[in-house]
Image: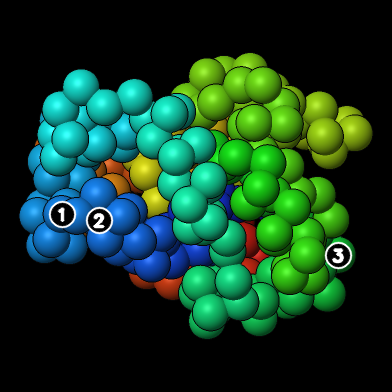
């Protein structure tokens, strides 16, 4: 079976989000250690990541907090330094192999625009905000399939760092799911015992092209 298209999650798959979380901790006046520990607790409980803001600032309105932060001129934007070093070489190799490369994650439109502006080598760049649906909703993966213009789902791979949002729903959609074991969600979820072992596991993106060529 030849993989004809591969889509990537964004956070902790392509983008190291450490700086974003650190800046949130600094903005809220919470130590980075406390903030990251609270985020780990949220992940362990299987809660939405925004729950961390309730933990460190009880009763906070996240949308209002984002507007407040933006008004203060402290808006996070993905920079070249935030991309993991293996991202661009991997995506280039896949495109050179004739594979359609897409990026689609649970992100605001600003991140979608930033990735385009950075010139990340991809044929399709999208986000949950522009599509109006978030993972793990099945409609998100149906949209990915639709974006490929007729490629069999069994020939589409989805790569992500989360078993709940990426690997399992992609598999249910009939796609080839690849678990990238890096970042806090990957480490915590893979050791939780709450998820079935993924069929394909990689520790970095450098090994992805060879994996896909062997499927």
x, y percentage for residue 94? 73, 68
Please name the residue that numbered disc 3 is placed on.
98
The residue lying toward the viewer, choosing from 173 and 115, is 115
Secondary structure under tag 1 reads loop
Tell me the quarter of the picture where residue 215 sits. bottom right
**Looking at the image, which residue sits at the far front?**
72
> Which disc number belongs to residue 208?
none
**Looking at the image, which residue sits at the far right?**
149
Tag 3–tag 1 contact (CB < 8 Å): no
The residue lying toward the viewer, choosing from 214 and 188, is 188
Please name the residue that numbered disc 1 is placed on.
30
x, y percentage for residue 119? 79, 70
Secondary structure under tag 3 reads loop
Residue at (83% x, 74% y) in the render:
96
Question: For mark 2, does the 10 Å Cα neighbourhood hold few (<14), some (14 to 19), or many (20 or more) residues?
Answer: some
Q: Is residue 163 left or right of residue 127?
A: left
């Amino acid at each position: 079976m030849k993989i004809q298209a591969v889509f990537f999650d964004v956070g902790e798959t392509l983008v190291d989000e450490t700086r974003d979380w650190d800046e949130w901790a600094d903005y809220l006046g919470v130590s980075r250690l406390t903030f990251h520990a609270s985020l780990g607790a949220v992940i362990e409980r299987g809660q939405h990541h925004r729950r961390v803001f309730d933990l460190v600032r009880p009763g906070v309105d996240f949308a209002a907090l984002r507007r407040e932060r933006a008004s203060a001129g402290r808006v996070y934007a993905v920079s070249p330094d935030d991309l993991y070093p293996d991202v661009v070489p991997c995506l280039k190799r896949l495109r050179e192999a004739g594979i359609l490369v897409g990026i689609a994650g649970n992100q605001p439109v600003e991140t979608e625009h930033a990735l385009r502006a950075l010139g990340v080598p991809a044929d399709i760049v999208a986000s949950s905000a522009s599509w109006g649906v978030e993972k793990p909703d099945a409609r998100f993966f149906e949209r990915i399939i639709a974006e490929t213009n007729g490629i069999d789902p069994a020939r589409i791979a989805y790569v992500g760092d989360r078993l709940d949002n990426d690997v399992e729903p992609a598999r249910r959609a009939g796609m080839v799911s690849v678990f990238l074991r890096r970042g806090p969600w990957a480490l915590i979820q893979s050791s939780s015992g709450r998820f079935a072992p993924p069929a394909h596991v990689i520790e970095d993106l450098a090994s992805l092209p060879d994996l896909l060529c062997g499927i």
